[in-house]
Image (cartoon, grey):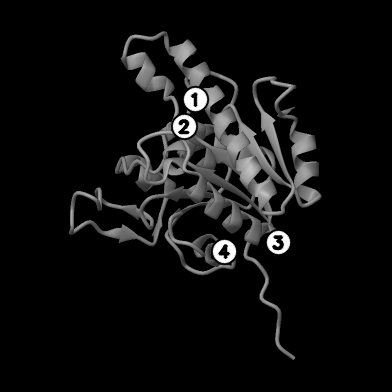
């Protein structure tokens, strides 16, 4: 009798950058890319893994960038939070079209569009097998969506935070610019901070470190890698 292979994690939080949703476009949302990502997420949900997601807003607005151009930082950050709501609604649509149940929960109250973020309700949705998208960051300016992802992952008791990027892990230098860049299979939180590897902003890394939340970084453009990672294969880089 063959033994059933079980997923390595019961509950995950998947963090995607807003820029990822652009696909090959210069800005906005690429429907074909978001459709493929929705199918990958649904496949993981279908095997019984509870999936929460945080998506950035950089494909539409970036609060820090607007501030550099002269806009009030708090106003810019609020615009960035609304951009993440737009991205979460588009992902919700793609996930539901793929045949899964999905809820968007916002840190800013937008009751006609999505639910308010309430931790207990979020956990209940996950327990019922629904995919949950956390929008509007932490609801506060000056915090990135990386920090929001770390915070939400800790609040819901996720086993791991998985960060999707355009490269297959963390390198000692930018692999797009340096052919001799070396990829790490494993690295500590302290080393990631000291070497300024740009995994996430320092606040997010420290949150994960202080709450023993491992982070896995992988290439989200490699179809099937999310499933392999969740099943316990050595994909990308583990920060712990």
> For the residue carrying disc 4, how many other residues have a C-alpha within 10 Å: few (<14), some (14-19), or many (20+)?
some
Q: In this rendering, which labeled residue sits more in front, label 4 or label 2?
A: 4
Left or right: 10 with respect to 36?
A: right
Q: Foreground residue, 141 or 111? A: 111
Residue found at the very far bottom of the displayed protein: 1
Q: Position of residue 235 (x, y in %)?
A: 45, 64
Q: Quadrant of the N terminus?
A: bottom right
Assign a secondary structure to mark 1.
Answer: loop
Q: CA distance from mark 2 to mark 3?
A: 33 Å
Say which residue label 3 marks. 46
The disc at residue 203 is: 2
Q: Earlier in the sequence, mark 3 or mark 4?
A: 3
Say which residue label 1 marks. 143
Left or right: 136 with respect to 184?
A: right
Q: Foreground residue, 148 or 96? A: 96
Tell me what residue is drawn at x 41 percent, y 46 percent: 23
Q: CA distance from mark 3 to mark 1?
A: 32 Å
Q: Earlier in the sequence, mark 2 or mark 1?
A: 1
2 and 3 marks in contact (CB < 8 Å): no
**Residue 89 seen in the current view:** yes
**Residue 154 seen in the current view:** no
Say which residue label 4 marks. 227
Q: In this rendering, which labeled residue sits more in front, label 2 or label 3?
A: 3
Q: Earlier in the sequence, mark 2 or mark 3?
A: 3
Q: CA distance from mark 1 to mark 4?
A: 30 Å
2 and 1 marks in contact (CB < 8 Å): yes
């Amino acid at each position: 009798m063959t033994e059933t292979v079980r997923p390595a994690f019961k509950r995950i939080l998947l963090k995607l950058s807003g820029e990822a949703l652009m696909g090959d476009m210069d800005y906005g949302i690429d429907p074909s890319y978001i459709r493929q990502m929705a199918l990958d997420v649904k496949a993981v949900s279908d095997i019984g893994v509870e999936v929460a997601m945080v998506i950035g807003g950089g494909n539409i607005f970036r609060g820090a960038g607007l501030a550099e151009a002269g806009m009030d930082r708090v106003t810019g950050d609020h615009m960035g939070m609304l951009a993440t709501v737009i991205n979460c609604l588009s992902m919700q649509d793609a996930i539901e079209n793929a045949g899964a149940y999905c809820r968007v929960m916002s840190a800013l109250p937008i009751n006609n569009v999505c639910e308010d973020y309430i931790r207990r309700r979020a956990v209940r949705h996950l327990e019922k097998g629904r995919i949950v998208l956390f929008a509007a960051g932490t609801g506060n300016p000056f915090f990135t969506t990386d920090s929001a992802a770390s915070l939400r992952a800790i609040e819901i008791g996720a086993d791991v935070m998985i960060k999707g990027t355009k490269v297959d892990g963390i390198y000692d230098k930018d692999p797009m610019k340096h052919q001799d860049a070396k990829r790490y299979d494993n690295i500590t939180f302290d080393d990631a901070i000291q070497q300024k590897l740009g995994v996430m902003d320092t606040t997010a890394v420290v949150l994960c470190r202080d709450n023993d939340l491992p982070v896995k970084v992988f290439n989200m453009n490699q179809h099937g890698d999310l499933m392999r990672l969740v099943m316990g294969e050595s994909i990308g880089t583990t920060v712990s």
